[in-house]
Image: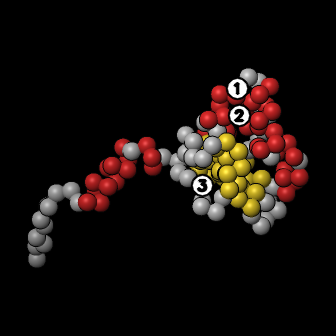
Amino acid sequence: MSLLYYDSGPTSNDLLHRLMANHSLFEPHYQIVAQSAEEVQNVENAPAVSMGPYLSNSGQTQLLTTISIYSLREDSREQVRLLYTSAAAIRVWEEMGKAPQIIGTQVRPPRSALLTYGVPFSQ
């Protein structure tokens, strides 16, 4: 028994996957940082408190337009707060001597996350 095979060319799904691969909007722009209960207790681990003075003191205030940090409260002691950080925010956070526990990446923060520091959806 032989099967008939008709090649109708690329499908709309093929086109969609090709366009997504070539389009930078679909690349993850936010790294997800988990903060434990112990980390949250130290006010210096709050970007809204510590990042501004660091940028000012280090002469890097021009980075304010590229930093975007959203936060979302969680329920476990290991992950009390999740920070959704832009690439620039992660670089500054590491320059500040922080050791972020990165647990993933995604294109945008969830709708329920609140802007904690910086500008909305920077890149």
Which residue in the protein does label 1 denote? 60
Which residue in the protein does label 2 denote? 92
Q: Position of residue 98 (x, y in %)?
A: 78, 39
Residue 76: tell me if it is visible.
Answer: yes
- What is the distance, in whole Å, between disc 1 and disc 3 at their CAs? 25 Å
Q: Residues within 10 Å of mark 1 (few under 14, many from 20)?
A: few
Compare residues 77 and 72 and report the one nearer the observer.
Answer: 72
Which residue in the protein does label 3 denote? 109
Which kind of residue does numbered mark 2 sit on?
A: Val
Return the disc, 3 or 2, that comes first in the chain's sequence.
Answer: 2
Q: Residue at x 82, y 42 (%)?
A: 49
Q: Position of residue 93 (x, y in %)?
A: 73, 37
In the structure shown, which secondary structural element does the residue marked by tag 2 occupy? Answer: helix
Q: Position of residue 24 (x, y in %)?
A: 43, 43
84 sits left or right of 41 in the view: left
Return the disc, 1 or 3, that comes first in the chain's sequence.
Answer: 1
Which kind of residue does numbered mark 3 sit on?
A: Pro
Which kind of residue does numbered mark 1 sit on?
A: Gln
- What is the distance, in whole Å, between disc 3 and disc 2 at their CAs? 19 Å
In the structure shown, which secondary structural element does the residue marked by tag 1 occupy? Answer: loop
Q: Is residue 34 above or below residue 98?
A: below
Q: Residues within 10 Å of mark 3 (few under 14, many from 20)?
A: many
Compare residues 96 and 54 and report the one nearer the observer.
Answer: 54
Q: Residue furthest top?
A: 59
Q: Quadrant of the N terminus?
A: bottom left
Q: Quadrant of residue 22?
A: top left
Q: Are marks 1 and 2 in contact (CB under 8 Å)?
A: yes
Q: Quadrant of residue 122?
A: top right
Mark 1 vs mark 2: in front? 1
